[in-house]
Image (cartoon, rainbow, N blue to C red):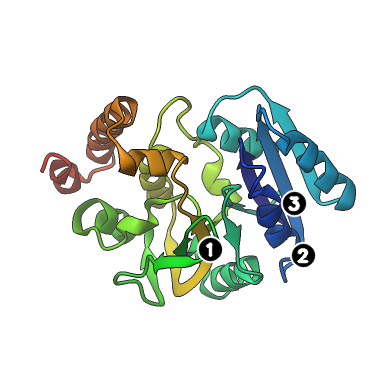
Amino acid sequence: LISVIIPIYKVEKYLSRCVESVINQTYSNLEIILVDDGSPDNCPEICEEFSRRDARIKVIHKENGGLSSARNAGLDIMTGEFVTFVDSDDFIARDYVEKLYTLTKNSGADISMCILARIDEDGEIISFDSDETKDEIISGQDALYNIVCSRKFEHHISSCCKLYKAELFSNIRFPVGLLHEDEYITPRILHECGKISVTSEALYFYTQRKDSIMGQRTSNFNAKSFNDLVKIFQDRYSYLISIGMPDAAEYQLK
């Protein structure tokens, strides 16, 4: 069983496309968790309609608490052996789950991951986050060092584009109230895993929205975004020291 967690807030324009891409996966043994994070539009009704159509879908309605809070709510009820996150304005290739699961099964990895294609609001591809990505198996420690120091896997800091063994989240949750939550959690997850299987194939489609959190970060200065990022990098410095990676910690000061 693979759990798919989809946090939802003010995305009624994109929600059906996202959920349909999960429902129609070639790998069908799924637990699909829709987390309505207090969305004020028609998203709650859309979620309920999908749950009536597909018995694999579970719906959580909660007060708005942000992306981390919504993902954590999904993690708290998931029952799958593996878990993946899909943001509700994005969508995945029809064989996304099957290919990542096959990578994990064949390699014995704790995480498998792909690259993403960035698309505009009309669905046209803008770019691929390929960089130096190639098909390979890498240790969690090497991946952590590469993200922090060499930036080889910098675009893989996202919590999306990955299939995780669910046990990796036994004692780890996203930081509620902070932006750049992936910058916080991904180093911790990588430290806990033995092997990561990487494919250079683009299986995840990320919508670059002007009104999204990321869009706002890149279009103008945001004091909270900046302050949260400083807090997370300070925390990462301490964390890297605590796990015996002082050279990587020092890189955070550069």
**Residue 89 located left or right of residue 244:** right
Count the marks: how many?
3
Q: Which residue is mark 1?
A: 204
Amino acid type of the residue tagged 2 in the rendering = Ser
- Image location of residue 100, percent across then percent down: 57, 68
Using the numbered discs, state the Cα–Cα distance from disc 2 to disc 3 in whole angstroms: 9 Å
Tag 1 near tag 2, CB within 8 Å: no
Secondary element at image label 1: strand
Residue at image mark 2 = 28
Query: Callout 3 environment at 10 Å: few (<14), some (14 to 19), or many (20+)?
Result: many
**What's the residue at 74%, 51% (across, down)?**
31
How packed is label 2: few (under 14 Cα within 10 Å), some, or many (20 or more)? some
SS for tag 3?
A: strand
- The residue identified by callout 3 is 31
Q: CA distance from mark 1 to mark 3?
A: 19 Å
Residue at image point 52% right, 36% down: 171
Q: Quadrant of the C terminus?
A: top left
- Locate residue 214: give its quadrant: top left
Q: Position of residue 131 (x, y in %)?
A: 30, 69
At label 3, the amino acid type is Glu
**Residue depth check, mark 1 versus mark 2: number of the one nearer the observer:** 1
At 45% across and 24% down in the image, what residue appears? 177
> Could you tell me residue 108's position as x and y percent?
53, 68
Residue 156 located left or right of residue 63 = left
- Does any portion of residue 115 appear in the rendered image? no
